[in-house]
Amino acid sequence: MKRLFIFHFRPLEQYPPILNLLWFLEGKVSVNCFSTKGRLKSERFKNDINVFRFGLLNSNKLVLWLTYLYFNVSSLVALIVYRPKRVIYIESLSSFPAVIYKRFINKKADVFIHYHEYTSPEEYESASFVEKFCHKGEKMIYNEVAWISHTNSSRMQKFLLDENLQYDKKRQQVMPNYPSRSWAVQCESWNPKETLKLIYVGYSLTEEGSYLKELYDELKELSISIEINIYCIEQNSFMKQFEGQKGKLQLNLHPAINYCDLPTELSKHHVGLILYRATTTNYIYNAPNKLFEYLSCGLDVWFPKEMKGISSYESSKCPKVIKLDFNDLGLTRLISDKVENDSQGKEKQEYFAEEIYEKFFEFINS
């Protein structure tokens, strides 16, 4: 296979699935990947994976608009110069160079599309001008591309309905966000004589978008020692009001850590938290990558009942996946059950990115 071109506008380091894909492709094919710079330290890849970062994403609107321009013009020029046969773009914001290339420059090129998130028509209407513009463009090539994938079947079904597309079992696929086989570091079972450690990893937590307050208010009343560690890229005053010691509950805020360092940190904990309020269709039908990352490291997972995308993974076997009503938690019984279940040992969870991406790579090669 000749060089593969991948477009991912948002910084790679904020999206573990694209990192896992690039690591999977190392040694298999030469890749030119086009992205931008973010707040996290840039990951390194082997020589056959070339990453070009055009612009910087931050809160400055002028810098953001210059980044839009820099990314799209530079990416399009690269496509014109190298004329690749296979192009992958991820999310609507990454689509413009691939759309122009497919429609006007190389109509024979195979284009592969993947979406980390599901975006409803209403959300596209309220999105930025650039994202709306990009989405209008990509709609023109949906019937011509070689592949479109979403992270689960619910999101795919909603996408097909929104875009009035007929289902094609070959071209439309589900590609979940699993961690690498070599990624996990197994945690130790919880000894009730020691501190119960909970962890949340994500972009941020807000009052209107999370159940942090509800969880905190319940945990601080318990008589056992509990520690919550939160690792977020964006921290705010809402999160900081809970920091410190309250009774036997200790909550610590940490800056985000690089993805490669995450397994070691996860393995120091017993429960992985998913705290989204899930008020949009995207989050309701979301099985986030952190679910599989927690499970791969042997952590129990607590998630809100609103997240239907996780419901199919519910399990009473260790590591457990437990649906909670965050307005009526009843954690005393839940923690008591954890002691009993942990003593029975854990089942190994096998959600591997390699198995998913092997099928994708075979399709690209076919």
Image: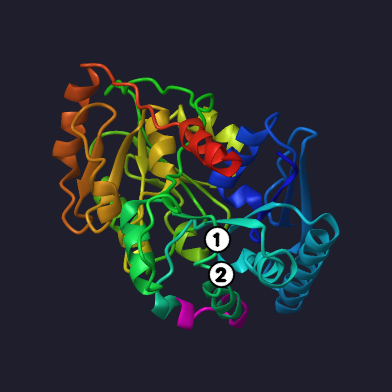
Residue 236, given in percent of the width and then of the height, sits at 53, 63
Q: Do the residues labelled 2 and 1 touch (CB within 8 Å)?
A: yes
Depth check: give the residue in front, 337 or 219.
Answer: 337
Give the main secondary structure of the magenta stretch: helix
How many residues crowd mark 1 within 10 Å: few (<14), some (14–19), many (20+)?
A: many
Q: What residue type is labelled 2?
A: Ile
134 above or below 282? below
The residue under label 2 is: 141
Classify mark 1: helix, strand or loop. Answer: loop
Determine the residue positioned at 42% across, 45% down.
176
Q: Which of 140 and 96 is in front in this view?
A: 140
Q: Which amino acid does label 1 sit on?
A: Val
Query: In the picture provided, is 7 more to the left or to the right than 303?
Result: right
Q: Is residue 187 above or below residue 248?
A: above
Residue located farthest toward the right when viewing the structure as drawn? 81
Quadrant of the drawing holding the N terminus: top right
Q: Where is residue 208 in the image (x, y as percent from the top left)?
A: 37, 69
Q: Where is residue 175 in the image (x, y as percent from the top left)?
A: 44, 46
Tag of residue 134: none
Quadrant where the C terminus is found in the figure: top right
Q: Mark 1 points at which residue?
A: 145
Q: Is 130 included in the stretch rendered in magenta?
A: yes
SS label for mark 2: loop
Label 2, label 1: how far apart the Cα atoms are: 6 Å
- How far across and down, in percent of the image, does residue 182 sit? 53, 24
Describe residue 246's horizontal placement relative to residue 82 as left or right: left
Magenta span: 124-131
* Image point (33%, 70%), residue name: 161
